[in-house]
Image: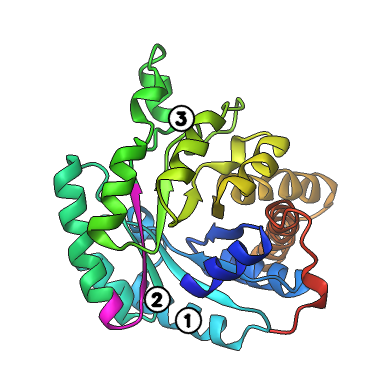
Amino acid sequence: MSTLMADAEKNNYAVGMFTAPTMPFAEAVIEAAEEMNAPVMVGQVECWKQYGDIEIYGPIMADMARRAKVPVCLHLDHGQSIQYIMKAVRSGYTSVMADFSMLPFEENVEMVRKCVDFCHSVDISVEAMCGKMPSVYDLAEQPDLDIREYFSNPDELKEFVEATHADAMTISFGTVHNMKIMQPMLDFKLLQELKDATDCALVMHGSSGVETEQIKQSIPYGIRKINAYTKLSTSAQPALQDAMSRSEEPMFFHELLDIAKDAMKNAVKESIELFGNGYDFSSRTW
């Protein structure tokens, strides 16, 4: 991850990280990146481990990453236990998110520091989170919730990076996980303060619901990695519905998989184009 973040910083773009709970997702992401000649990050998330055993899929995805024609970082998203993070490292992952943001600040720092100490010793990059990231489910349960309560604090961000030496930091400044029904508004004043607080690569989670122009606007503020899943995953449904409505006979499951994968691949390509911030990947030799 660190190598990709450095190139993104040099050329003022953001690398897309696309969660892939199953193999068709991973294939869609890597094929899209190859067609765009762009670097990419792909991987699984601990809370969805029921969709794919990391010890089985991890080595397969690691091999796919090695064989790709473009740089592919295999990344564990939202690793929330030391045991699972270690399992990802053993399975071939080249970067991990040590997400202990559910803990008090001091405990979050201590857990991430332990992960960084080990992971850096085996050349694995570490992402962490300062602040908390709300989800659309939090908003549904608490309609009057002020999401500013979740926002990252610049002073805490500075302290966090200095104490842990994390390679990338997820920050909370207005985005929401799993957003499908409304557009969150980003706090660019806070984003500038967070950028000024550290030289560490900054990460945006919950990009799927964010207005295109706001994503473009955020990149020059030091956003070097952008996570996307909802846009990728939901793109399959209309394609499948259209194909099934036009079919005069039952469709094979493998046909449906191909249709879903093509739709997701197109969604990934659109996101890579957006996150690229106008950078021309076509001339790069990887």
Q: Is residue 79 left or right of residue 236?
A: left
Residue at the location (63% across, 51% down)?
232
Residue wearing tag 2: 93
Which badge, 2 or 3, comes first in the chain's sequence? 2
Residue wearing tag 1: 62
**Is residue 123 a member of the stretch shown in magenta?**
yes
**Is residue 272 a member of the stretch shown in magenta?**
no
Above-or-below relation of 222 to 73: above
Spatial CA span between label 2 and label 3: 29 Å
Above-or-below relation of 129 to 92: above
Q: Are marks 1 and 2 in contact (CB under 8 Å)?
A: yes
Question: What x and y, as percent, mark residue 234?
Answer: 63, 45
* Amino acid beneath label 1: Ala
Residue wearing tag 3: 136
Spatial CA span between label 1 and label 3: 31 Å
Of residues 33 and 5, the one nearer the viewer is: 5
Question: What x and y, as percent, mark residue 143?
Answer: 41, 14
Q: Secondary structure at mark 2?
A: loop
Which badge, 1 or 3, comes first in the chain's sequence? 1
Spatial CA span between label 1 and label 2: 7 Å
Q: Secondary structure at mark 3?
A: helix
